[in-house]
Amino acid sequence: MHKAGLVCRALTFSNPFLLKTPIHMSSAKDAPNSASSIRGEWTSALDDLPPITEGQRRIPAFFFAHGSPLLLSNKKSGGPFSAVMELQGPRSPLAAFLTDFGPHLLRKYEPKAIVVFSAHWETNGETLVTDYGNDNPLLYDYYGFEKELYQVSFKSHGDSATSKRVVDLLRKAGISARTTPKEEARGRDGRGFMGPGLDHGVFVPFKLMFGDATNVPIVQVSIDGSLSPETNWALGKALDELRSQGVLILSGGLTIHTFQDMSAWAEKTANARVRGFHSAIIDAVRSSPGSLKSSLCSLNKVPGFREAHPREEHFVPIYVAAGAGEEGSARVINSQYGAATFAFGV
């Protein structure tokens, strides 16, 4: 249910520009020419990822651009949020990428389960792991949108064995962790959204990636609220073993996320410092395995970092994915400005 006055850290504004029309699901064929012009990059990168074989059974861990509720909107670019819509609207390159990304992962890896992290769930002192049983509820952790965006459905289920395995691995690594059931509100991240459920950093992109429903169990894990690169790296590293057990690890955020300077969302309007920061991210991911960690963990010292991320909750999920895929190389899957996606542990 939508509750007045709630706040979404992804979109902390009341949005009067959404059209009052039914939700239109974006598809690859709906995407504009700007998407087709870069589709070749991500198609080639996804095709080049090694498949699961007898000799190589580890699934890469991915940092992916999770977008915003605008991905499921009929809104056309315009008004003060045109830069956000250009990046994250239903006809954006990101929407096209996600509709390609999900099916490719399912075909190539046939995962037994998905363990997902989102920029929209932080906890301090204790990592929480969903154990929602046969029906994962959804947490509509945003406000100011048209009613259709509070009627979005995405059917999925959890898996208690996977949840327990995640908790066991975290505890083995010295990280305090426990499961959280459907009966417990997960609103412990200080954002005011009470109730259990997968947040919009999960169900919005997953609806594009996997359709209206998926039979693959989904378990969500909170990121560490310290927002420390090292701590969140360790969080991901603790779960590395899952990759060789048929589990797909996805960690969602955005490479650019700010509402202090709306021009930063689009490459054509962003200042040189922010554009330089985004280029530095791509360069860091392309570092050799031996220097990858130091390159990634020093990105917060690059000019433009704080302008791109006034608060870095949307950036630190990259460290979770990199930690989970520490053993192996990294690859750029989609270099889209502000909404890049990377594979780790290839």
Image (cartoon, rainbow, N blue to C red):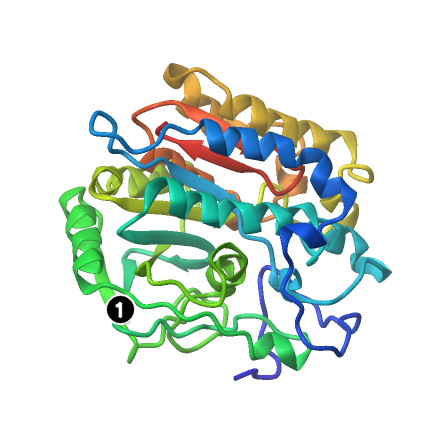
Q: Is residue 325 left or right of residue 96?
A: left
> Residue 306: percent from the left, percent from the top?
63, 40
Q: Indicate the quadrant where residue 336 lies.
A: top right
Instruction: Read off the residue under disc 1.
Output: 180
Identity of the residue drawn at 21% across and 25% down: 55
Q: Is residue 135 left or right of residue 2?
A: left
Q: Nearer the viewer, residue 198 or 57?
A: 57
> Residue 321: percent from the left, percent from the top?
39, 39
Identity of the residue drawn at 56% across and 34% down: 43
> Residue 15: percent from the left, percent from the top?
74, 70
Instruction: Name the kind of residue labelled 1 in the image.
Output: Thr
> Residue 22: percent from the left, percent from the top?
69, 77
Count of marks overlaid on the render: 1
Q: Is residue 132 above or below residue 294?
A: below
Q: Indicate the quadrant where residue 178 lies.
A: bottom left
- In the image, farthest residue toward the right: 79
Is residue 41 at least partly visible in the picture?
Answer: yes
Q: Is residue 159 above or below residue 287?
A: below
Is residue 316 at least partly visible in the picture?
Answer: no
Q: Nearer the viewer, residue 4 or 138?
A: 138
As helix, strand or loop, the secondary structure at mark 1 comes to strand
Q: Indicate the quadrant where residue 213 lies.
A: bottom left
Name the quarter where the C terminus is drawn: top left
Q: Is residue 94 left or right of residue 121?
A: right
**For the residue carrying disc 1, how many other residues have a C-alpha within 10 Å: few (<14), some (14-19), or many (20+)?**
some
Identity of the residue drawn at 66% across and 62% down: 70
Q: Is residue 15 above or below residue 107?
A: below
